[in-house]
Amino acid sequence: MSKRLVFAFMFMLPLATQASCYSVVMLENAYASNVSFGGVTIPTESLRGLLITNARIDAESGISTTLLLCDESVPNAFAGHKDGRNVVGITVGMVKLLGNDWHAYAAVIGHENAHLVKNHGSKRQQREGVLALGRMILKSSLPQNAGVLAPTIVEYGIAGFSATYSQKEESEADKLGMEFSHCAGFSADGALSVHRKLDSESGFFAIHPSSKLRIARLRVAIIAQQRNPDCR
């Protein structure tokens, strides 16, 4: 896969699309000192730190998750369900990028837990089903002489509608995930640290206004959280 950075840790990705993933608990138990994984050497002490961070976020968010490490060089993370369990996956590329910045990891894991708590995955599947039906109905209602432009307009309209809802879910997970991490004892600024590291890797935010808007909203939420912590 290309080394191009894909800022996808904010999205819930289907497990079927992921690279080979392994339980962090199993990796931590199987290796005495270091794990060579995806061309990156990870100290088992760092795996232990990931597990501790994950446990603290789970306790704060009120759900139990299995943490996975995935053999993928692109910095990424995802949340989903497998065999009746909640799972959160982090790629080797993300571990390489964040190093031992536990506040940043807490923000990433908190964000993914927020997706699970808010059931965004199921909502997205339902929405995609409705949009697929709408697409079929709209296209079938077009007159035969509509030409090639009309179907294209339909596709853009459907895509725009879907993206609007997706951005709303991501902003919601940004805020709630930050609250989880802060209430679990991590710095609320950990989320901004993730953004800075990702941006320094690729300059992603320089060309994505929607991401800049999310960062601005996150800054406002962090200030509010620090002044009046919204913790259980």
Image: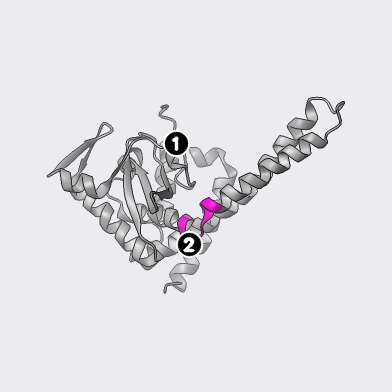
Task: Tell me whether circle 2 and circle 1 mark residues in contact (CB < 8 Å).
Answer: no
Give the residues drawn in magenta, as a range: 116-122
Query: Which corner quadrant holds the C terminus?
Result: bottom left
In the displayed structure image, the side of residue 229 where residue 123 appears, left or right: right
Q: Residue at x 60, y 50 (%)?
A: 126
Q: Is residue 161 shown above or below 18?
A: below
Q: Main secondary structure of the magenta part?
A: helix
Quarter location, residue 197: top left
- Residue 17 - label: 1
Instruction: Name the amino acid, label 1.
Output: Thr
Mark yes or no: residue 216 visible: no
Q: Secondary structure at mark 1?
A: helix
Which of the two marks, 2 or 1, is nearer to us in this view? 1
Query: Which corner quadrant holds the N terminus?
Result: top left
Q: How many marks?
A: 2
Return the x and y of residue 75 as percentages of the image width and height: 39, 39
Q: Is residue 145 magenta?
A: no
Quarter location, residue 139: top right
Of 129 and 175, the residue lying toward us: 129
Give the residue at the far left of this rendering: 32
- Residue 176 - label: 2
Q: Secondary structure at mark 2?
A: helix
Q: Label 1: few (<14), some or many (≥20) within 10 Å?
A: few
Instruction: Name the amino acid, label 2.
Output: Leu
Return the x and y of residue 181 as percentages of the image width and height: 38, 62
Quarter location, residue 133: top right
